[in-house]
Image (cartoon, rainbow, N blue to C red):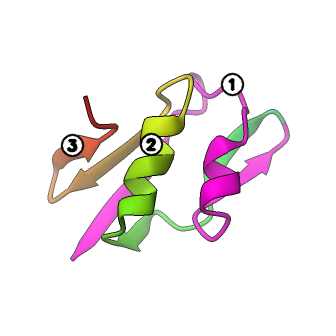
Amino acid sequence: MSWHVEVDEHTCIGSGMCAALMPEVFVLDGAVAQTVVSEVDGDETVLDAADSCPAMAITVTDGGREIGPRP
């Protein structure tokens, strides 16, 4: 199972929460975060990173269906 992870650079405020939770997926690049890889194996921690983003700038999709951030 592979999930697609995306960071909206226009929404991101660079809090670094995602990079702290999953440095293998997210990195701070200047004032915003970006993904190191856009496709990841299904992992609850990726959803936790999306949930913890204060700007709600991370989107996780599975087969085109948005699964993160969770409501």
Which amino acid type is marked by label 1? Ile
Is residue 64 or residue 15 the one in the foreground?
15
What crowding class fits label 1: few (fewer than 14 Cα within 10 Å), some (14-19), or many (20 or more)? some
Q: Is residue 69 left or right of residue 10?
A: left
Q: Residue at x 46, y 63 (%)?
A: 38
Q: Which residues are magenta?
A: 1-30
Position in image of residue 61 (x %, y %): 26, 51
Q: Is residue 31 left or right of residue 36?
A: right
Position in image of residue 10 (x %, y %): 59, 23
Please give the residue where the numbered disc 3 appears in the rendered image.
Answer: 66
Mark number, residue 13: 1
What crowding class fits label 3: few (fewer than 14 Cα within 10 Å), some (14-19), or many (20 or more)? some
Does residue 71 sit above or below 46 in this rendering? Answer: above
Q: Quadrant of residue 50?
A: top left
First in sequence, mark 1 or 2: give its number: 1
Which amino acid type is marked by label 2? Ala
Residue 20 counted in the magenta span = yes
Position in image of residue 23 (x %, y %): 67, 64
Instruction: Find the distance from the CA under tag 2 to the CA under tag 3.
Output: 11 Å
Please give the residue where the numbered disc 2 appears in the rendered image.
Answer: 50
Q: Nearer the viewer, mark 2 or mark 3?
A: 2
Which amino acid type is marked by label 3? Glu
First in sequence, mark 2 or 3: give its number: 2
Is the C-beta separation of discs 2 and 3 under 8 Å? no
Q: Tell me the SS state at disc 1.
A: loop
Q: Tell me the SS state at disc 3.
A: strand
Does residue 16 sit above or below 12 in this rendering? Answer: below
Q: Nearer the viewer, mark 1 or mark 2?
A: 2
Instruction: Find the distance from the CA under tag 3 to the CA under tag 1.
Output: 21 Å
Q: Residue at x 21, y 77 (%)?
A: 1
